[in-house]
Image (spheres, rainbow, N blue to C red):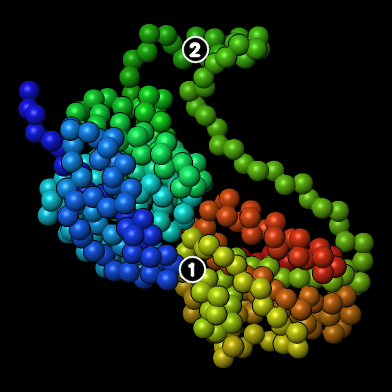
Amino acid sequence: MSTEKFKVVHYLNQFYGGIGGEDKADYQPEERLGLVGPGQALQAGLGERGEVVATVICGDSYFNENVETALSAILAMIAKHNPDIVVTGPAFNAGRYGVACGAVAKAVAENLKVPVVSGMYLENPGVEMYRKYAYIVETSNSAADMRKAMPKMAKLVIDLAAGLEVSPATHGYLLQGLRKNYFHSESGAKRAVSMLVSKMSGQPFTTEYPMPHFDRVAPNMPIADVRQAKIALVTSGGIVPKGNPDHIESSSASKYGKYDIAGITDLTVETFATAHGGYDPVYANQDADRVLPVDVLFEMAAQGEIGSLHRYFYSTVGNGTAVAKAVTFAKKIAQELLDDGVNAVILTST
């Protein structure tokens, strides 16, 4: 039996690479020999069986704004070490980081043909986009889970490197959406009846086809008289003042903006544009009213068809933004709108 250690290359963003925070998110890909930051916990979990031979670091903004260029550089840095396994993250609930980890996993799986292990919160957009290319260990939504996440990732790395069979049930990674045909000792009909009997009698059972969970939001009561209503605009279409003063990300937004339009009757090409990176921005940049209809609502208010248009609009980018993050935005925005006496909101997207 060979005692040679298997080789691991670790991918990190600029924060976990020790380079800096959001101010360094434009950091270009860099390769370092050995382990960096969370790589210490990874190496501790691998013990004597594997070695983190190199770490590749890239800023989240640089990656998501220069995907092809970044991937080409990162893939070349990884390939030169001829790794047996690649580890990305963990990214927890950081959207841009998760997307980058997933994209790196896809490139590695397709080009280098080696397994990739990552770690993410279930609602990280990187999960839905790239789950079939990596073994993504489920984590909590914050880095406070690092001490629990890294040992699970290391265990999975060890077993994959050893060629052992792994599964979501035994190794805690998220379902990949892949199906394998196999012969079961019982027919599907018998298994279904057994599950039904267990369910009806209050006994535990495990479904073979888990269903997705969707939030159900009860609609509000209709506006009694829209001619008296104060209406606000909120958009996930990324409409912002020219220059994007709040630096809202083009994908996996970590923030939203609040902008004063008192006295503004039209969003002109000189003053407003979109920060969104998920659709062709040409038409929105020519006339931002196409996404955020300030001009039409101003006319309706002037003609008495609505009571008034709220002087502030709220904007973010929905492209790749985590559901949990969007819920956080919504709660803050909704409370401000209620405090300002807004009666109704028009939500626009792309």
Residue type at mark 1: give it.
Answer: Glu
- For residue 242, what is the image quadrant? bottom right
Q: Residue at image x 84%, y 71%?
A: 230
- For residue 115, what is the image quadrant? top left
- For residue 7, what is the image quadrant? top left
- Label 1: element kind: loop
307 to the left or right of 218: right
What label does residue 174 carry, if any?
none
Q: Give how far across and how far down residue 105 sits, in percent.
A: 30, 49
The CA span between labels 2 and 1 is 48 Å
Q: Give how far across and how far down residue 199 sits, in percent.
A: 62, 14
Q: Residue at image x 42%, y 36%?
A: 148
Q: Is residue 109 visible?
A: no
Q: Give how far across and how far down residue 32 sits, in percent.
A: 20, 58
Q: Give how far across and how far down residue 294 sits, in percent.
A: 71, 79
Q: Is residue 126 above or below residue 6?
A: below
- Label 2: element kind: helix
Q: Which residue is mark 2?
A: 191
Q: Residues within 10 Å of mark 2 (few under 14, many from 20)?
A: some
State which quarter of the image contains the C terminus. Answer: bottom right
Q: Residue at image x 67%, y 77%?
A: 259
What label does residue 249 carry, if any?
1
3 to the left or right of 192: left
Residue type at mark 2: give it.
Answer: Arg
Q: Is residue 269 above or below residue 249?
A: below
109 to the left or right of 172: left
